[in-house]
Amino acid sequence: MFRTLSARLFAVLMVGLGTIQIVSFFAFMVFRGEEIKEQMMRFLGADVSFAYDLMRSVPPEQRPDWLSRLNQGFHYRFSLEPTQGSMPDTVGTDERIAGVMSVLKADLPPEARISFRLPREVPDDLRDRAIQAVLVIDDDDSLVLHLLDPFAMPSEWALIGYLGIVLLAVSPFVWWAVRLSTRQIDRMLGTIEHFGRNPDSPPVPESGPEELQKAARAVNAMRERILHHIEERTQILAAIAHDLQTPLTRLRLRAEALEQGGQRDRIISDVEYMANLVTEGLDYARSVHLTETRSLIEVNHWLEGMVDDAIDAGAKCRLEGLALSPYTGALRALTRAMQNLIENALKFGTEAEVRIEDSAERLRIRVRDNGPGLNDALLEKVFEPFFRVESSRSRDTGGIGLGLSIARNTVLAHGGDIRLYNRKEGGLEVVVDLPRGTS
C-alpha cells in the first residue's frame, strides 16, 4: 500500500497533521480553556440577569415572543415553564455547577429564587455536559436556562469525526505538495530508465531542489563514464577486428593455394568461421551504442525487400499489413536485426510470416514461424550473448549466438523492446515494438 515514495510521504504528513491536531486541542484545553471559560461565564451571568429582569418586566402573554430573541445558540438557551410549588435541587453539590451557581447568584438580584437540575430529555452523549437552571419569575412562569458546557471533553466519536473532516479537507493540498516534491524524482527515474534502453537518450535535467540537482549531476557523471566505457570497448573491438582481417585473409589465401583435399576445405571453413565471429562480435559491440545516423525508413518497401530476398532464395515467406508512415531509425542496424529474425524463422520452420501493425504510438512488427517453438524457460535466455539452443555448437545449425542479442540491442537503442512467444498453433512469434516519436 505504501510502496511508493509519494504514498509514504503522504501517510507521514497526514499522520503528523492528525497528531498535531490532537495535541493542539488538548494543549488548548489545558492552557487556555479555564481562562476562556471564566470569561464566557461572566457573559453568561450578565445574559441570564438581563433575561430574568426582562421576563419580569413584560406581561406574561408577551414573554414567549421576547424569549426567542434571548436564545444564544447551541451552548445555552432559554425556555418557559409553569412555576411549581417547590423547586427541589436535583443536582445537589455537583462540581459541574459550582462555578455556574456562583456566577449566576452574583449577577441576579438577592430575591431571585434559583435551582439546578439535570435535563429530563437529552442525548446520551451530551448528558454529562448538560445542566438546567430554573429561575422563578412569578407564580405563573419560571425561566429555564438550558446550559451545555462547551469546555467539557467531547465524545470519542466527536473527536474522530472532527479529525476526519480536518484531514479530508487538507488531504488534497498535502497530496499536491507531495507530488510537487516527487515529480522531479519521477522524471529523473524516467530519464535513467530511458538511458537503460537507449544510451543516446538525453541526460537527466539538473534542475529542482539542491539535493535533486546533486543527484542529477551524479547520475549524469555516471552516464558519461558508461558511455565512455562503451565507446572505448567498441573502439578496442573494432581495432582487434581490423587487425585480424589481414592475417585471416593471408590464411585464406594460403589455404586456397593448397592442393585440393579435406584439410584445405577444413582450414578454409575455420578461417571463414573466425572471420564471421570477429564481424559478429564487432556488430554486437556497435549495437549497444548506435552511432549510425538515423533517417526516414519506408517501412513497407524496406520489409518487402527483405521478404522478396528470402523468396528469391527459395524460402516460403510472406508480408502482411501496411505501415501508416515512414519510421525514423538506424537503417543498417534495423535491417541487420530484422534479417536475423527472418533467417531464424526460416531456419527453424518451413515458412515465415512478417506482419506489420502500425499506429500513431508505435510500429509493431511480428515475425512468425511454424517450427517447434522453444521451452518457456528459454524465451528470455536466448537473448543472452553467445547463447545457442543447439548445445552441439554446430556451425551449420547453431550459429555464433549473437543474432538475437544484436537484434535486441538495436531495438532497445530505438527505445523499443523485443519479445518471444510460443504460438498456440505451434511455432514461435517474435514481436518487435518500436515507439514512434521517441527514437
Image (tube, grey):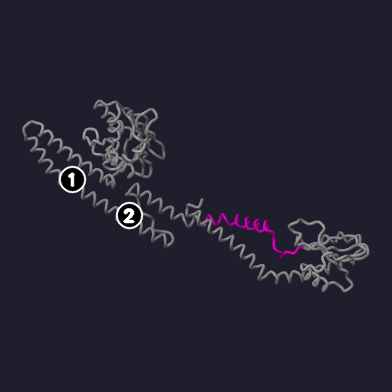
Majority secondary structure of the magenta segment? Answer: helix
Identified by mark 2, the residue type is Arg
Give coordinates of residue 231: x percent, y percent: 25, 51
Pick the front one: 209 or 113: 113
Please state which amino acid type lies under the numbered disc 1: Ala
Find the distance from the CA under tag 2 to the CA under tag 1.
27 Å
- Image quadrant in which you'd find residue 159: bottom right
SS at circle 1: helix
Where does the image place residue 172, in percent across and percent down from the top left? 56, 54
Q: Please report contact status of discs 2 and 1: CB closer than 8 Å, yes or no.
A: no
Left or right for 171, reference 330: right
Q: Which residue is mark 2?
A: 223
Q: Which mark, by number, is residue 356?
A: none
Q: Quadrant of the C terminus?
A: top left
Residue ID for mark 1 = 241
Along the line of sight, the residue nearer the viewer: 200 or 384: 384
Report the residue that reaches farthest toward the front: 392
Residue 170 is covered by the magenta coloring:
yes
Residue drawn 59% across the image and 63% down it: 20
Q: How many marks?
A: 2
- Quadrant in the picture for residue 282: top left
Q: Earlier in the sequence, mark 2 or mark 1?
A: 2
268 left or right, relative to 338 = left
Q: Crowdedness of circle 1 by 10 Å Cα count: few (<14), some, many (20+)?
A: some
Q: Secondary structure at mark 2?
A: helix
| Residue range (magenta) | 148-176
Of 4 and 36, the residue lying toward us:
4
Quick check: is 331 in the magenta stretch?
no
Front in this rendered view, residue 109 or 265: 265
Q: Is residue 391 above or below residue 291?
A: above
* Residue 438 position in % (x across, y down): 37, 45
